[in-house]
Image (spheres, rainbow, N blue to C red):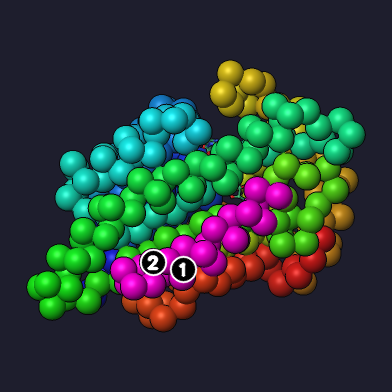
Amino acid sequence: MTRKLEGKVALITGSGRGIGRSIALKLAAEGARIVVNDLDAEPAQETVESVRQAGGTAVACVGNVTAPDFAERFINTAVSEYQGIDIIINNAGYTWDGVIQKMTDEQWYAIIDCHLTAPFRILRAAQPVIRALSKADGEAGRRIVRKVVNISSVAGMFGNAGQGNYSSAKAGIVGLTQTLAKEWGRLNVTVNCIAYGFIKTRLTSTAAGESTAKIDGRDIKVGMNPDLLMMLERSIPLGRGGTTDEAAGAVYLMCIPESDYVSGQTLLCSGGLTGI
Ligand SMILES: NC(=O)c1ccc[n+]([C@@H]2O[C@H](COP(=O)([O-])OP(=O)(O)OC[C@H]3O[C@@H](n4cnc5c(N)ncnc54)[C@H](O)[C@@H]3O)[C@@H](O)[C@H]2O)c1
């Protein structure tokens, strides 16, 4: 059977764990060659190994997406390893919550930088490469549609108490998506967003309720309050949080040829949840 993404080159930020890891495995299983990124080298390498063990092709580009030189390095990795770019998934992220009166400038900018400025820089660095590829396609009479999928959240669509920084960044990425859909249509690039509801990962686990992750030299609390989580699950029409494979499925839909005429859209992947 022909695979839907045979030979495509896909770059995925934050793909050492959680949703990003599942996206990497899914796209690789459909034939894409993957540039795996994560802040942490070990999980990034683990994803690369898992892709390879399943018969796929992957390489790691470890680093913080907020580093000023990251975008160029990420794009250059794809070009030097695979001579092209077909799919970019801006997924890396974490939360650092606080009500507005307690939120520091540092907390605000850290989350805006990760969820909005980093995708902006990656897409800006990709533009000259994509423009050249698109021009070459046109001259050769080929019509190749490239794909950008940005990851948003129900917090960005509807707001969420205690997440002023995160919900602003996740709303901002919707605006960037809509704008780039207009700028890049002529390059045959579709640009869409997936907004997740509650997907079971380190970010939302109860087991990790009291644990922290080292991000940018800071100890950031990860996991959610179990009572809040139970309440949230009850409000989801499908009655449960999603798996990372289900989350990856929504991204996959935006990467396959069947979505070639869908652009500038935000698809909720939330088990039917339409507000929080
Ligand atoms: N899990 C959910 O319910 C949910 C809901 C809405 C949106 N999201 C979004 O989905 C995306 C993935 O989240 P997840 O739930 O899989 O979390 P996760 O913690 O399981 O995985 C995120 C990965 O991103 C990496 N990462 C974090 N900051 C980074 C940085 N600055 N540079 C490079 N890598 C970085 C982490 O090391 C981690 O491996 C995020 O953008 C998140 O905001 C998740």
Residue ID at (46%, 68%):
181
Q: Looking at this rendering, what residue extends furthest in the front direction?
A: 183
Residue located at (38% from left, 72% from top)? 185
Numbered range of the magenta stretch: 168-192
Say which amino acid is labelled 1: Ala
Graded by Cα atoms within 10 Å as few (under 14), some (14 to 19) or many (20 or more), the crowding at tag 2 reads: some
The secondary structure making up most of the magenta span is helix
In front: 128, or 165?
128
Quadrant of the image occupied by residue 103 = top right
Is residue 196 one of those drawn in magenta?
A: no
Read off the residue under disc 1. 181
Q: Residue furthest left?
A: 140
Mark number displayed over residue 184: 2
| Nearer to us in this view, 270 or 13 | 13
Q: Quadrant of ligand 1?
A: top right
Check the picture and name the quadrant holding the N terminus. Answer: bottom left
Q: Is residue 12 left or right of residue 236?
A: left
- Residue 22 circle label: none
User: Residue, x 78% and y 45% (percent of image)?
Assistant: 164
